[in-house]
Image (spheres, coloured by chain):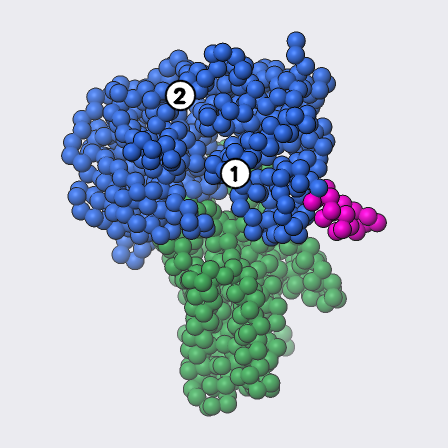
Chain colours: A green, B blue
Amino acid sequence: MSNVLAETKDLFTRNLRTSGIYIAFVAIVLLFTVLTGGLLLNPENITNLVLQNAHILIMALGMIMIIVAGHIDLSVGSVLAFASAVSAVLVIREGMPWWVGLLGAVIVGVLVGAWHGFWVAYVGIPAFIVTLAGMLLFRGLTLVVLQNVSLSPFPSEYKTIATDFSRGLFGEIVVGQSTGLKAVPVTVDVFTLVIGVLAVGAFILSQVRSRRARVGYNQKVESNVLFILKLVVVAVVVMAFAWALAYNRGFPYVLIVLGVLVLVYQLVTNRTVFGRHVYAVGGNLAAAQLSGVNVARVNFWLFVHMGLLTGIAAAVFSGRSNGAQPNMGNSFELDVIAACFIGGASTTGGIGRVTGALVGGLVMAVMSNGMSLMGVPQSLQPIVKGLVLLIAVAFDIYNKRRAGAAR
Amino acid sequence: MTDAILEMRGITKDFPGVKVLKGVNLSVARGEIHAICGENGAGKSTLMKVLSGVYPHGSYGGDILFDGQEVSFSSIRDSEQQGIVIIHQELALVPFLSVAENIFLGNERVRGGLIDWNQANHEAAEYMARVGLSENPTTPVGQLGVGKQQLIEIAKAMTKDVKLLILDEPTAALNDTDSEHLLGLLRELRDQGITCIIISHKLGEIEAVADSTTIIRDGESIETIDMHGADASQDRIIRGMVGRSLDHRFPDRTPQIGEEIFRVENWTVRHPTQADRLVVDDATISVRAGEIVGIAGLMGAGRTEFMMSVFGQSYGRDISGRVLLHGKEIRTRTVKDAIANGIAYVSEDRKHYGLNLISDIRTNITAAALDKLSDWASFVNGNEEIKVSEEYRRAMNIKTPTVMQTVGNLSGGNQQKVVLSKWLFSDPEVLILDEPTRGIDVGAKYEIYEIINQLAAQGKAIIVVSSELPELLGMSDRIYTLAYGRITGQLPVEEATQENLMSLMTIEKNQKEAAA
């Protein structure tokens, strides 16, 4: 048993830099749970939290790759507005079907990404300048496309992805009776539970397979006890979360979108040649070039990915806000960038993880949500966020210096 | 006892894993021009960095006496306050600022908190006159030639009340007229009472200008020669520079040399920004299977530039010439082409050009040939990758428990083994090794030589660039000499000696033309 303890300890201390943010996340969640008297972890609140921040988390998946490669993208707020505006014009003004709008938003995002990628990769202008120009350019185009007015509302199908829940999709089951004057049957959503079971099943399957592959390659794996413990903990947490959702409105569709994207980009960054090249370019540009990495092509596709994700975020966010406004998406880029740096990305490139950016975004989401629940004045919230960002980057620099001294 | 302005006694300096200075003594008399000679890597620059406070007091061993006082500088600022100014080979001027602004940079002529431009320009003109410049002090430095920029550096030094002026390879980038002028100026400064230390590879120049010469070899001071003495000559300096006992041991090897497999013909490369400068000038070399070919040349001869331009045109512009593999011309427009055609290049500067230091051994080893580990959808097989890199870790004896170790935490020798692993994994036929043992301790050097020998035994064509002549003599089968971008000679190792290589390496352009 002491073996397992030692292993667990090793798991956390091995890489404090990356596990630090997870520990901080848990601490912040616990802190606000206590401060809000448990309101934070109320399932209703958790779904709200996800719905309110999905677009930021989606864009953070692209931004983390941009930052790892040593760039930055300041334009995502404007691009999100522009893509939403085009979609709103197509659907609301021109009366086209809802899916044309969603597709339009994504295509606009990809095209804008290719535009930025061209200037960064093939003309060689720093991304800071290119996307600063893009920030102005696409904000202006948003105004032009919308002719300076807000467009609203979208048809209900358009809003499904952003705002709807799965309740009743596969039916409901009765789990008890409510207590009160008139006994009403209490039900839970089947679809949500199915998703929960599928997620747990997929997780266990992939873990067992990767463990078997590692054993096949004679690599060290954690002991059986720890492995099973890990699976059980994850299964319990996921099922508890699913149960809580099922008990309420069901599974928000946007969480499916987010989940799929996280999986995809987790794979892209960790398992593909492209992902490796992104880290190589950010870690040492000259060495990457001399290893045969086509740096221009990597940079180009990076911005296309960012554009695609911004387009998807636009489809989600415009649905949620039920239209397009000239000033929508203002300063989103700052939230997205902050999420990446809080999540452990290095300011000089080469270091950063998709999961880190995700948790970084959630840290900010939980903080604003928690502060709102506590009734902290709106004006104080950016102050706290700013301080958290500073501390996170200070931690990064402190770590780097320590690593440098050890060299 | 002569009046010494500077005494350095028993200076030692360690870098992790290597002892760069092993007890250097240097005594410079007041008002003389003192030359320091030594091969690349002998420790000259390190010694000057110790003197000027770049390496602060406490990070080196030994004592420094300046003007009879023991000094302990903790930064360049401290040494400059005492009147020691160093002018580096790479000039530290800001090209967009004017001459006057550069001269007073960090030392601005201020009145009432604001810069007094009239005063500054007026004073700058006076200093410029002292070094023989008549340009307008408001001219941007970038518009002047390298020779004049060098003089501006000296003028800048003079504003700091310099007592001891150190010049690191001051004429390396200058043409003959500018060099003459500069050397004349040094004599004038000496007559005005400024002591000079000059580091140079140009022995003719040293003979002409220096009053005494200290030779440094392998981090030790060998001797100080009075240049006005009867036995002072270039030959004597060369003997001192190279005459180390061959205590570096090289692993035994029986060369098995086959057909010619690699050839570079009429290779000409221009400087990336100075279009009229030929960095490599009509060079032709060939390598046979199983052969180790050495390339010898002094700093600035164009060795690295030559090799990098061959490797996917990573350096220079307007490159012309042909690269042939097995007699067929191959495409080397990009690094990817070069790698695909079986060429590998191990850079002289592994930290900047070879490794991703913040990443682990595994990803560094596979970086140049990731395609070999990925499927049709470009997914990398992570387990196969760990297996492969573990194999290299063991085969190369990289001393660390796992391939997940961050490369930046390894010693120089182990880092170099990671770079070698990376290129071996790309399965090259031609391996270009640029300074493969720079900054590596003796034990690791031996291991690297063994690896290189094994590769040659496998029939690969190997090119080794090195500034250490004993290394080239110890490993190569044939040695080319490179001077000022031209191949000036080629010797089978049996005929090569440090002396005849050194004289081929110092052939200047006009000498070669005169000889031809």
**Is the residue under label 2 in contact with that under label 1 (CB below 8 Å)?**
no
Q: Position of residue B245 (x, y in %)?
A: 39, 13
Instruction: Indicate the quadrant containing the C terminus of chain B: top left, top right, bottom left or bottom right.
Output: top left
Task: Residue under label 1, please give it.
Answer: B178
Amino acid type shown at disc 2:
Gly
Task: Residue under label 2, please give it.
Answer: B443
- Taking depth in this image into account, of B124 and A240 the one nearest to the observer is B124
Instruction: Indicate the quadrant containing the N terminus of chain B: top left, top right, bottom left or bottom right.
Output: top right
Which residue does the image show at 60% across and 28% down from the upper left?
B187
Query: Which residues fall within the magenta stretch?
Result: B107-125
A271 up-or-down from A312: above or below: above
Q: Which mark is residue A403?
A: none
Q: Position of residue B161 (x, y in %)?
A: 72, 32
Q: Is residue B477 magenta?
A: no
Which residue does the image show at 47% across and 23% down from the upper left?
B38
Which residue does the image show at 45% across and 81% down from the upper left?
A101
Residue furthest to the top: B1
Q: Is residue B110 left or right of residue B391?
A: right
- Taking depth in this image into account, of A355 and B388 the one nearest to the observer is B388
